[in-house]
Image (cartoon, rainbow, N blue to C red):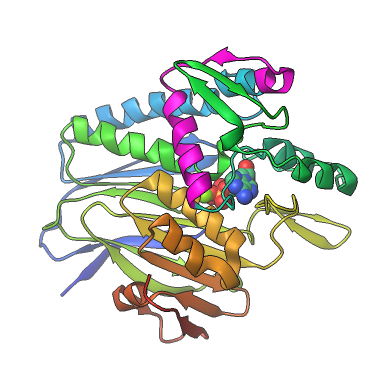
Amino acid sequence: MKRLRHLFILPTLVLGLASCGDPPPVDHISTLYVFGTKVEITVRGEDADLAKKATAQLDQDFKRMHKDWHAWKPGELTNLNRAFAAGESLAVTSFLKPLLIQAKTFENLSDGLFNPAIGALISAWGFHNDEKPKGGLPDFNLIRDLAARKASLNDITIDGDLVSSSNATVQLDFGGFAKGVALDRAEQTFKDLGIKSALINAGGDINTLNGPDADPWQVGIRDPKSWGVIATLDLADGEDVYTSGNYERFREIDGVRYAHILNPATGMPVDHIVSATVITHNGALADAAATALTVAGPKDWHRIAKKMGIKFVILVDDNGTVYLNPAMKARIVFNPEAKITIIESAPL
Ligand code: ADP
Ligand code: MG
Protein backbone atom coordinates (compact mmCIF):
# COMPACT_ATOMS: atom_id res chain seq x y z
CA MET A 1 0.00 0.00 0.00
CA LYS A 2 1.26 3.44 -0.86
CA ARG A 3 1.46 5.94 1.90
CA LEU A 4 1.67 9.70 1.58
CA ARG A 5 4.64 10.73 3.65
CA HIS A 6 4.41 14.47 3.44
CA LEU A 7 2.46 17.08 1.59
CA PHE A 8 3.51 20.50 0.39
CA ILE A 9 1.09 23.15 -0.70
CA LEU A 10 2.30 24.82 -3.86
CA PRO A 11 1.04 27.51 -6.19
CA THR A 12 0.13 25.08 -8.90
CA LEU A 13 0.62 21.68 -7.44
CA VAL A 14 0.35 19.81 -4.23
CA LEU A 15 2.90 17.15 -3.90
CA GLY A 16 4.11 14.52 -1.59
CA LEU A 17 6.20 11.46 -1.56
CA ALA A 18 4.62 8.10 -2.13
CA SER A 19 6.56 5.57 -0.17
CA CYS A 20 6.08 1.87 0.48
CA GLY A 21 9.17 1.21 2.59
CA ASP A 22 9.12 1.27 6.37
CA PRO A 23 11.01 3.05 7.87
CA PRO A 24 11.08 5.63 5.07
CA PRO A 25 14.38 6.98 3.73
CA VAL A 26 15.58 10.26 5.23
CA ASP A 27 14.75 13.44 3.29
CA HIS A 28 16.95 16.49 3.38
CA ILE A 29 14.83 19.49 2.50
CA SER A 30 16.26 22.92 1.76
CA THR A 31 14.96 26.10 0.22
CA LEU A 32 16.60 28.55 -2.19
CA TYR A 33 15.16 31.79 -3.52
CA VAL A 34 15.93 32.37 -7.20
CA PHE A 35 14.06 33.27 -10.39
CA GLY A 36 11.66 35.28 -8.26
CA THR A 37 10.42 32.08 -6.75
CA LYS A 38 11.06 29.64 -3.97
CA VAL A 39 12.96 26.55 -5.01
CA GLU A 40 12.47 23.62 -2.69
CA ILE A 41 14.97 20.80 -2.89
CA THR A 42 14.42 17.39 -1.42
CA VAL A 43 17.31 14.94 -1.47
CA ARG A 44 16.18 11.51 -0.44
CA GLY A 45 18.13 8.83 1.35
CA GLU A 46 21.60 10.39 1.17
CA ASP A 47 24.14 11.52 3.69
CA ALA A 48 23.35 14.99 5.10
CA ASP A 49 26.75 16.38 4.07
CA LEU A 50 26.28 15.34 0.46
CA ALA A 51 22.80 16.88 0.38
CA LYS A 52 24.21 20.12 1.79
CA LYS A 53 27.07 20.21 -0.69
CA ALA A 54 24.71 19.58 -3.61
CA THR A 55 22.33 22.33 -2.52
CA ALA A 56 25.17 24.84 -2.10
CA GLN A 57 26.32 24.02 -5.63
CA LEU A 58 22.82 24.59 -6.98
CA ASP A 59 22.55 27.90 -5.18
CA GLN A 60 25.66 29.11 -6.97
CA ASP A 61 24.55 27.78 -10.37
CA PHE A 62 21.05 29.24 -10.07
CA LYS A 63 22.42 32.67 -9.19
CA ARG A 64 24.59 32.73 -12.28
CA MET A 65 21.70 31.61 -14.48
CA HIS A 66 19.42 34.22 -13.00
CA LYS A 67 21.93 36.96 -13.67
CA ASP A 68 23.07 35.98 -17.13
CA TRP A 69 19.71 34.88 -18.53
CA HIS A 70 17.84 37.87 -17.25
CA ALA A 71 15.97 39.70 -19.99
CA TRP A 72 16.16 43.17 -18.51
CA LYS A 73 18.75 43.31 -15.72
CA PRO A 74 22.36 43.80 -16.83
CA GLY A 75 23.93 40.51 -17.84
CA GLU A 76 24.86 38.52 -20.92
CA LEU A 77 21.34 38.39 -22.32
CA THR A 78 20.70 42.13 -22.05
CA ASN A 79 24.00 42.76 -23.86
CA LEU A 80 22.88 40.47 -26.64
CA ASN A 81 19.46 42.15 -26.84
CA ARG A 82 21.18 45.51 -27.10
CA ALA A 83 23.34 44.20 -29.95
CA PHE A 84 20.25 42.94 -31.81
CA ALA A 85 18.54 46.32 -31.51
CA ALA A 86 21.68 48.03 -32.86
CA GLY A 87 22.09 45.52 -35.72
CA GLU A 88 25.41 44.32 -34.34
CA SER A 89 26.86 40.88 -33.67
CA LEU A 90 28.11 39.77 -30.28
CA ALA A 91 30.16 36.81 -29.09
CA VAL A 92 28.23 34.65 -26.62
CA THR A 93 29.58 32.30 -23.96
CA SER A 94 29.12 28.54 -23.95
CA PHE A 95 26.72 29.21 -21.09
CA LEU A 96 24.23 31.07 -23.29
CA LYS A 97 24.73 29.50 -26.71
CA PRO A 98 22.99 26.13 -26.04
CA LEU A 99 20.01 28.09 -24.75
CA LEU A 100 19.64 29.92 -28.06
CA ILE A 101 19.66 26.64 -29.94
CA GLN A 102 17.15 25.03 -27.57
CA ALA A 103 14.91 28.10 -27.75
CA LYS A 104 14.86 27.98 -31.54
CA THR A 105 14.05 24.26 -31.58
CA PHE A 106 11.13 24.71 -29.19
CA GLU A 107 9.80 27.75 -31.04
CA ASN A 108 9.67 25.81 -34.28
CA LEU A 109 8.29 22.67 -32.66
CA SER A 110 5.47 24.69 -31.09
CA ASP A 111 4.53 26.39 -34.36
CA GLY A 112 5.68 29.68 -32.85
CA LEU A 113 3.28 29.58 -29.87
CA PHE A 114 6.29 29.38 -27.57
CA ASN A 115 8.39 32.27 -28.76
CA PRO A 116 11.20 33.62 -26.55
CA ALA A 117 12.05 36.32 -29.12
CA ILE A 118 9.01 38.43 -28.13
CA GLY A 119 10.76 40.20 -25.26
CA ALA A 120 9.80 43.60 -26.70
CA LEU A 121 6.11 42.66 -26.41
CA ILE A 122 6.55 41.24 -22.92
CA SER A 123 8.28 44.41 -21.87
CA ALA A 124 5.60 46.62 -23.48
CA TRP A 125 3.01 44.80 -21.36
CA GLY A 126 5.18 45.17 -18.25
CA PHE A 127 5.34 41.43 -17.66
CA HIS A 128 8.76 40.99 -16.29
CA ASN A 129 9.06 37.64 -14.63
CA ASP A 130 10.09 38.45 -11.08
CA GLU A 131 8.69 41.92 -10.60
CA LYS A 132 5.22 43.21 -10.00
CA PRO A 133 3.87 44.81 -13.17
CA LYS A 134 3.22 48.52 -12.99
CA GLY A 135 1.76 51.23 -15.17
CA GLY A 136 -1.36 51.35 -17.28
CA LEU A 137 -2.28 49.63 -20.50
CA PRO A 138 0.27 49.68 -23.29
CA ASP A 139 -0.45 51.51 -26.52
CA PHE A 140 -2.28 48.92 -28.64
CA ASN A 141 -0.86 50.42 -31.84
CA LEU A 142 2.61 49.69 -30.50
CA ILE A 143 1.58 46.13 -29.61
CA ARG A 144 0.13 45.54 -33.09
CA ASP A 145 3.21 47.03 -34.69
CA LEU A 146 5.61 44.90 -32.64
CA ALA A 147 3.61 41.72 -33.33
CA ALA A 148 3.58 42.50 -37.06
CA ARG A 149 7.37 42.50 -37.08
CA LYS A 150 7.28 38.79 -36.23
CA ALA A 151 10.33 38.50 -34.02
CA SER A 152 11.59 34.93 -34.13
CA LEU A 153 14.62 32.88 -33.15
CA ASN A 154 14.79 32.04 -36.87
CA ASP A 155 15.97 35.63 -37.41
CA ILE A 156 19.10 34.81 -35.45
CA THR A 157 22.34 33.62 -37.00
CA ILE A 158 24.89 31.76 -34.90
CA ASP A 159 28.30 31.68 -36.49
CA GLY A 160 30.72 30.03 -34.11
CA ASP A 161 30.33 32.16 -31.00
CA LEU A 162 29.08 35.20 -32.90
CA VAL A 163 25.37 35.86 -32.78
CA SER A 164 23.39 38.41 -34.75
CA SER A 165 19.77 39.05 -35.71
CA SER A 166 18.38 40.13 -39.08
CA ASN A 167 15.35 41.51 -37.21
CA ALA A 168 16.00 44.40 -34.82
CA THR A 169 12.72 43.65 -32.99
CA VAL A 170 14.13 40.39 -31.60
CA GLN A 171 14.53 40.71 -27.84
CA LEU A 172 15.10 37.46 -26.04
CA ASP A 173 13.09 36.70 -22.92
CA PHE A 174 13.62 33.21 -21.58
CA GLY A 175 10.96 33.53 -18.86
CA GLY A 176 8.89 30.82 -20.56
CA PHE A 177 11.48 28.06 -20.20
CA ALA A 178 14.48 29.26 -18.13
CA LYS A 179 13.19 27.41 -15.09
CA GLY A 180 13.14 24.19 -17.07
CA VAL A 181 16.68 24.72 -18.34
CA ALA A 182 17.87 25.57 -14.84
CA LEU A 183 16.23 22.53 -13.29
CA ASP A 184 17.67 20.25 -15.98
CA ARG A 185 21.12 21.57 -15.16
CA ALA A 186 20.45 21.12 -11.45
CA GLU A 187 19.39 17.55 -12.10
CA GLN A 188 22.64 16.90 -13.96
CA THR A 189 24.66 18.43 -11.11
CA PHE A 190 22.93 16.09 -8.67
CA LYS A 191 23.62 13.08 -10.90
CA ASP A 192 27.28 14.09 -11.19
CA LEU A 193 27.48 14.23 -7.40
CA GLY A 194 26.10 10.71 -7.18
CA ILE A 195 22.64 11.57 -5.87
CA LYS A 196 20.08 9.01 -6.96
CA SER A 197 16.81 10.36 -5.69
CA ALA A 198 15.77 14.00 -5.47
CA LEU A 199 12.98 16.41 -6.25
CA ILE A 200 13.57 20.02 -7.24
CA ASN A 201 10.48 22.15 -7.13
CA ALA A 202 10.49 25.71 -8.47
CA GLY A 203 7.04 27.07 -7.69
CA GLY A 204 5.22 23.99 -8.93
CA ASP A 205 7.55 23.22 -11.83
CA ILE A 206 9.31 20.04 -10.84
CA ASN A 207 12.25 17.90 -11.92
CA THR A 208 12.72 14.56 -10.26
CA LEU A 209 15.54 12.11 -10.07
CA ASN A 210 14.65 8.52 -9.34
CA GLY A 211 15.53 5.04 -10.49
CA PRO A 212 12.84 2.86 -12.09
CA ASP A 213 12.55 0.69 -8.96
CA ALA A 214 12.33 3.52 -6.43
CA ASP A 215 9.09 4.76 -4.88
CA PRO A 216 7.53 7.35 -7.18
CA TRP A 217 7.13 11.00 -6.24
CA GLN A 218 3.51 11.94 -6.00
CA VAL A 219 2.15 15.28 -7.23
CA GLY A 220 -1.26 16.86 -7.29
CA ILE A 221 -2.95 19.04 -9.89
CA ARG A 222 -5.05 21.96 -8.79
CA ASP A 223 -7.86 23.55 -10.68
CA PRO A 224 -7.37 27.20 -11.65
CA LYS A 225 -10.51 28.49 -9.97
CA SER A 226 -11.22 27.00 -6.58
CA TRP A 227 -7.70 25.77 -5.84
CA GLY A 228 -8.82 22.31 -4.89
CA VAL A 229 -6.71 19.30 -5.78
CA ILE A 230 -8.55 17.75 -8.67
CA ALA A 231 -6.17 14.88 -9.31
CA THR A 232 -2.97 13.20 -8.21
CA LEU A 233 -0.39 11.30 -10.16
CA ASP A 234 2.91 9.53 -9.62
CA LEU A 235 6.14 10.54 -11.32
CA ALA A 236 8.32 7.56 -12.14
CA ASP A 237 11.86 7.13 -13.32
CA GLY A 238 12.97 10.75 -13.23
CA GLU A 239 9.97 12.31 -14.93
CA ASP A 240 9.45 16.08 -14.79
CA VAL A 241 6.15 17.91 -14.51
CA TYR A 242 5.55 21.55 -15.51
CA THR A 243 2.48 23.71 -15.29
CA SER A 244 1.81 26.96 -17.01
CA GLY A 245 -1.27 29.03 -16.61
CA ASN A 246 -2.64 32.46 -17.17
CA TYR A 247 -4.75 32.61 -14.04
CA GLU A 248 -2.12 33.41 -11.42
CA ARG A 249 0.07 36.07 -12.94
CA PHE A 250 -1.82 38.84 -14.62
CA ARG A 251 -2.42 42.54 -14.31
CA GLU A 252 -5.79 44.05 -13.76
CA ILE A 253 -6.38 47.36 -15.47
CA ASP A 254 -9.81 49.03 -15.32
CA GLY A 255 -11.36 45.77 -14.14
CA VAL A 256 -9.97 43.71 -17.03
CA ARG A 257 -7.43 40.96 -16.45
CA TYR A 258 -4.44 40.72 -18.75
CA ALA A 259 -2.49 37.49 -18.35
CA HIS A 260 1.30 37.29 -18.52
CA ILE A 261 1.34 34.76 -21.34
CA LEU A 262 1.07 36.35 -24.75
CA ASN A 263 -0.09 35.08 -28.09
CA PRO A 264 2.99 35.91 -30.23
CA ALA A 265 0.86 36.25 -33.39
CA THR A 266 -1.24 39.10 -31.99
CA GLY A 267 0.91 40.38 -29.14
CA MET A 268 -2.15 40.17 -26.89
CA PRO A 269 -2.47 38.20 -23.65
CA VAL A 270 -4.07 34.80 -24.01
CA ASP A 271 -7.72 35.38 -23.20
CA HIS A 272 -8.99 31.91 -22.29
CA ILE A 273 -8.25 30.93 -18.70
CA VAL A 274 -6.49 27.66 -18.58
CA SER A 275 -3.68 25.79 -16.91
CA ALA A 276 -1.64 23.30 -18.89
CA THR A 277 0.39 20.55 -17.22
CA VAL A 278 2.78 18.30 -19.11
CA ILE A 279 5.03 15.42 -18.12
CA THR A 280 8.25 14.53 -19.93
CA HIS A 281 11.84 13.65 -19.10
CA ASN A 282 13.18 17.05 -20.15
CA GLY A 283 12.37 20.07 -17.99
CA ALA A 284 13.20 22.66 -20.65
CA LEU A 285 10.90 21.00 -23.17
CA ALA A 286 8.20 20.55 -20.54
CA ASP A 287 8.39 24.24 -19.55
CA ALA A 288 8.27 25.44 -23.17
CA ALA A 289 5.43 23.04 -23.96
CA ALA A 290 3.35 24.09 -20.93
CA THR A 291 3.63 27.72 -22.08
CA ALA A 292 2.83 26.81 -25.70
CA LEU A 293 -0.18 24.73 -24.67
CA THR A 294 -1.51 27.57 -22.54
CA VAL A 295 -1.45 29.71 -25.68
CA ALA A 296 -2.96 26.88 -27.76
CA GLY A 297 -5.81 26.43 -25.26
CA PRO A 298 -8.64 23.90 -25.41
CA LYS A 299 -9.01 24.22 -29.19
CA ASP A 300 -5.45 23.63 -30.35
CA TRP A 301 -3.54 21.87 -27.55
CA HIS A 302 -3.67 18.39 -29.06
CA ARG A 303 -2.07 19.40 -32.34
CA ILE A 304 0.72 21.34 -30.62
CA ALA A 305 1.40 18.62 -28.02
CA LYS A 306 1.71 16.09 -30.83
CA LYS A 307 4.06 18.32 -32.76
CA MET A 308 6.22 18.83 -29.66
CA GLY A 309 6.34 15.10 -28.95
CA ILE A 310 4.64 15.40 -25.54
CA LYS A 311 2.98 12.18 -24.35
CA PHE A 312 1.13 13.34 -21.22
CA VAL A 313 -0.99 16.48 -21.10
CA ILE A 314 -3.80 17.82 -18.96
CA LEU A 315 -5.50 21.19 -19.40
CA VAL A 316 -7.96 22.59 -16.89
CA ASP A 317 -10.12 25.60 -17.68
CA ASP A 318 -11.99 27.92 -15.34
CA ASN A 319 -15.29 26.05 -15.84
CA GLY A 320 -13.75 22.90 -14.40
CA THR A 321 -13.45 21.26 -17.80
CA VAL A 322 -10.48 18.95 -18.01
CA TYR A 323 -8.92 18.10 -21.35
CA LEU A 324 -6.47 15.21 -21.46
CA ASN A 325 -5.09 12.46 -23.62
CA PRO A 326 -5.88 8.80 -22.86
CA ALA A 327 -2.37 7.96 -21.61
CA MET A 328 -2.58 10.82 -19.10
CA LYS A 329 -6.05 9.72 -18.03
CA ALA A 330 -4.79 6.20 -17.43
CA ARG A 331 -2.19 7.34 -14.89
CA ILE A 332 -4.11 10.03 -13.07
CA VAL A 333 -6.35 9.60 -10.02
CA PHE A 334 -9.16 12.14 -9.88
CA ASN A 335 -10.42 13.48 -6.61
CA PRO A 336 -13.99 12.10 -6.44
CA GLU A 337 -15.15 15.35 -4.84
CA ALA A 338 -13.89 17.58 -7.64
CA LYS A 339 -16.68 18.99 -9.78
CA ILE A 340 -15.17 18.53 -13.20
CA THR A 341 -16.09 17.49 -16.71
CA ILE A 342 -13.53 15.32 -18.45
CA ILE A 343 -12.95 15.56 -22.19
CA GLU A 344 -10.66 12.83 -23.42
CA SER A 345 -8.85 13.43 -26.70
CA ALA A 346 -7.56 11.01 -29.30
CA PRO A 347 -4.20 9.44 -28.36
CA LEU A 348 -1.16 11.66 -28.72
P1 ADP B 1 5.50 30.69 -15.16
O1 ADP B 1 6.77 31.46 -15.26
O2 ADP B 1 4.39 31.40 -14.48
O3 ADP B 1 5.71 29.28 -14.71
P2 ADP B 1 5.56 30.22 -17.99
O4 ADP B 1 6.54 29.13 -17.95
O5 ADP B 1 4.42 30.02 -18.93
O6 ADP B 1 4.90 30.53 -16.60
O7 ADP B 1 6.35 31.56 -18.39
C1 ADP B 1 5.69 32.77 -18.54
C2 ADP B 1 6.69 33.81 -18.98
O8 ADP B 1 7.14 33.50 -20.31
C3 ADP B 1 6.15 35.21 -19.10
O9 ADP B 1 6.28 35.90 -17.88
C4 ADP B 1 7.00 35.82 -20.19
O10 ADP B 1 8.25 36.23 -19.67
C5 ADP B 1 7.24 34.66 -21.10
N1 ADP B 1 6.23 34.50 -22.17
C6 ADP B 1 4.98 35.01 -22.27
N2 ADP B 1 4.35 34.57 -23.39
C7 ADP B 1 5.24 33.76 -24.02
C8 ADP B 1 5.20 32.99 -25.22
N3 ADP B 1 4.11 32.95 -26.00
N4 ADP B 1 6.31 32.30 -25.56
C9 ADP B 1 7.43 32.32 -24.79
N5 ADP B 1 7.54 33.00 -23.64
C10 ADP B 1 6.45 33.71 -23.25
MG1 MG C 1 6.79 27.56 -19.40
Q: Image quadrant for the C terminus?
A: bottom left
Image quarter for residue 227? bottom right
Residue 217 seen in render? yes
Q: Residue at x 86, y 45 (%)?
A: 138
Q: Give the percent coordinates (x, y) of residue 268.
A: 75, 54
Q: Is residue 178 visible?
A: no
Q: Is residue 103 left or right of residue 336?
A: right
Residue 191 in the image: above or below residue 4: above
The part of the chain drawn in magenta is 82-109
- The foreground one among 66 and 178 is 178
Residue at point 72% right, 32% down? 169
Tell me where residue 59 appears, x and y as whole percent. Answer: 39, 28
Residue depicted at x 46% and y 23%: 64
Residue drawn where x is 48% and y is 54% of the image? 289
Q: Is residue 26 above or below residue 300?
A: above
Tally of marks: 0
Residue 344's image quarter?
bottom left
- Indicate the quadrant containing the N terminus: top left, top right, bottom left or bottom right: bottom left
x and y percentages locating residue 124 in the rendered image: 78, 39
Task: Choose between 76 and 141: the one closer to the eye.
Answer: 141
Residue 96: x and y in percent read 47, 24
Q: 46 or 102: which is nearer to us? A: 102
Q: In the drawing, does residue 345 fall left or right of residue 138?
A: left
- Which image quadrant is residue 8 in? bottom left
Secondary structure, magenta segment, majority class: helix
Is residue 56 part of the magenta span, yes or no?
no
Instruction: Say whether residue 297 is left or right of residue 232.
Output: right
**In this view, 54 is above or below 46:** above
Residue 125 to residue 220: above or below: above
